[in-house]
Image (cartoon, rainbow, N blue to C red):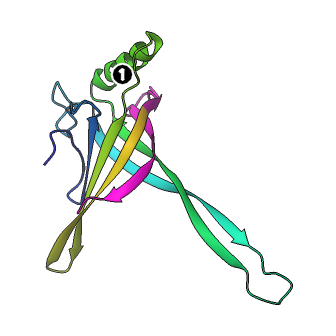
Amino acid sequence: MYATAFNIGIDRTVQLVDQTGRASSFDNTGSPGSLGRLISFESTATVDVVENPAISDGGDNDSMTEYKDWKGTIVIDRRNANADAFFAALEAAYHAGNQQLKFTIHETTVNRTGTQTSTSSFVYINASVWIEKTGTWALGTRPEITLMFHATRRVQAS
């Protein structure tokens, strides 16, 4: 198991590891090293459909799917200032002219069918991750931080 984990209940875990192999501490405990508790994880494939219309011979139109990349959203419950500090450091490094860190996102799902369980794992490769919203600060609500990612591809790990 990876050292960095967002956990959604018992069925999904998402890990984030930077290109140097360093794992930031993500967990649901709100511990001092945690970036926050995972609220939601969503990913969407970007595809183009290339169509080849039939020639005048009355044939069928043909089409092909061209896979581009993946985009997604990670929403966390802001339990401390760690996520803000983490992404502020990434932004400061960028403005200082340093190489931008890329991440690998590991997504693991426990599939339950009656008494049977199996695990499927996917990896999002070469992902840029950034903070989009720092949360709405209002009476009676919890501030939720919205992170966005853009990855070159998603491959099955197991």
- Residue range in magenta is 130-158
Q: Residue furthest bottom?
A: 58
24 vs 78, left or right, is left
Q: Does residue 146 sit above or below 158 in this rendering? A: above
Q: Is residue 40 above or below residue 23?
A: below
Which residue in the structure is indicated by mark 1?
Answer: 84
Task: Please tell me which residue is depicted at 43% across the width and 35% down the height of the picture.
Answer: 128
Residue 2, compared with residue 140, is above or below; it is below
Q: Position of residue 98 (x, y in %)?
A: 40, 15
Three-letter code, disc 1 = Asp
Q: Residue at x 42, y 28 (%)?
A: 139
Does 128 sit left or right of 63 as displayed? left
> Measured along the vertical axis of the image, is residue 102 above or below residue 46?
above
Label 1 SS: helix
Q: Quadrant of residue 93?
A: top left
Tell me, yes or no, whether the highlighted magenta stretch contains residue 68: no
Q: Is residue 46 found left or right of 63 in the rendered image?
A: left
Of the 4 image quadrants, the one containing the C terminus is bottom left
Q: Give the percent coordinates (x, y) of residue 80.
A: 27, 24
Give percent across and percent down for residue 135.
Answer: 44, 29
Q: Is residue 156 magenta?
A: yes
